[in-house]
Amino acid sequence: MTDNPYISVIIPVYNEEDNITELYGQLSSVLYSLNQPFEVLFIDDGSRDNTYNKLKEIKDDNVRIIRFQRNFGKAAALSCGFKYARSNIVITMDGDLQDDPKEIAKFLEGLKEFDMVSGWKYRRKDPFTKTIPSKIFNILTRVLTNVNIHDFNCGFKAYRGYVVKDIKLYGELHRYIPAIAQWKGYTVGEIKVEHHPRVHGKSKYGANRLLKGFLDLITVKFLITYIQRPLHLFGSIGVLLSGSGFLVGCYLIYLWFNEVKIGDRPLLNLSVLLIITGIQLIAMGLIGELFVNSKDNNNWIIKKE
Ligand code: UDP
Ligand code: MG
């Protein structure tokens, strides 16, 4: 195995038995033509078909196979690849032959300018039941995260090695890598890539994964905006609630001074409820703040050359 690979290609695969051999063929011809040491990391994400055996058939010392105990999802597979990749340039691609290895040269070019480069499947070859939700998803993510690219979820991406060591992925967070990278201060570029229709096997992403993906957008937005200052989120809602409870209370006191009986009024309950809920939220924010500040990790990252 090469000691210092120039480039690591990470490919998460889940039930892709009919794609492996052809994919390796296409990929290796591109990688060997670069004349640089490389490694390919296949992460078998708990496949139940013959994927693992197909991977074992590849006779190439530059290929490493990591096999998960069960299906943990694409984010976990990528995250594992990020951990074990050993080179200064990391490329991720899907293992279903929809991404074309010939595009790798363009990614390498893009990395001269940016810390990470995301692929844009500008002529996406998937059914419209996937492309339409994906368009909505991309617009929403662009607006909420301020990252100016068209295609967040494209599996074909390239990174300078240090970027992937700084990115933690879980759930469906792989859809938001450009947003997480930009938030950490890395520059993000985008290049157009060719996309092929899926010939063998089935897509693993249907409506249920989409919903999870949308929920994770809330996580990402929260991370980007509030991770250092939880009090700013919970505290402002708390102040708003307590404040309105206080105003309702003032109104009741005013009535009381005017000798109107206020004993059984629903407004009294509302006022007390608002004040207490508000105080609880402020307390939650403060506890969050203590937690964030008691952790020993830096909230800055020194720029790498
Ligand atoms: N994948 C994976 N784990 C999963 C689901 C998918 O490793 O739980 C892999 C899959 O084998 C493929 C890539 O992630 O290499 C993209 O998946 P898919 O083609 O199903 O997604 P789509 O292109 O339809 O969005
Ligand atoms: Mg696919």
Image (cartoon, rainbow, N blue to C red):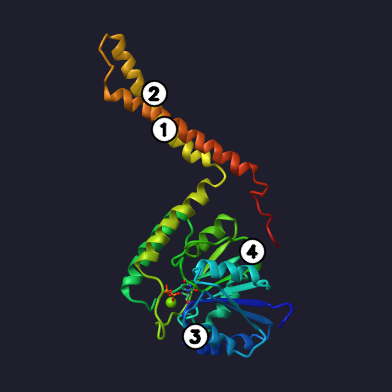
State which tag comes first along the sequence, 2 or 1: 2
Q: Secondary structure at mark 1?
A: helix
State the residue position of label 1. Answer: 277
| Label 2 vs label 3, nearer the camera | 3
State the residue position of label 4. Answer: 165
| Label 1 vs label 4, nearer the camera | 1
Give me the disc on residue 50.
3
The x, y position of residue 300, in whole percent, is 65, 50
Q: Secondary structure at mark 4?
A: helix
At label 4, counting other C-alpha atoms closer than 10 Å, the crowd grade (few under 14, some 14-19, many 20 or more) is few
Q: Residue at x 52, y 42 (%)?
A: 230
C-alpha separation, residue under disc 3 versus residue under disc 4? 31 Å
Q: Residue at x 48, y 85 (%)?
A: 17
The three-letter code of the residue at mark 4 reads Lys
Q: Is residue 285 left or right of residue 206?
A: right
Q: Is residue 166 left or right of residue 152?
A: right
Question: Which of the image's four quarters has the N terminus?
Answer: bottom right
State which tag comes first along the sequence, 4 or 2: 4
Marks 2 and 1 in Cβ contact (< 8 Å) = no
In front of the other: 203 or 87? 203
| Label 3 vs label 4, nearer the camera | 3
State which tag comes first along the sequence, 1 or 4: 4
Q: Is residue 280 left or right of residue 11?
A: left
State the residue position of label 2. Answer: 246
Which quadrant does ligand 2 occupy?
Answer: bottom left
The three-letter code of the residue at mark 1 reads Thr
C-alpha separation, residue under disc 4 versus residue under disc 2? 49 Å
At label 3, counting other C-alpha atoms closer than 10 Å, the crowd grade (few under 14, some 14-19, many 20 or more) is few
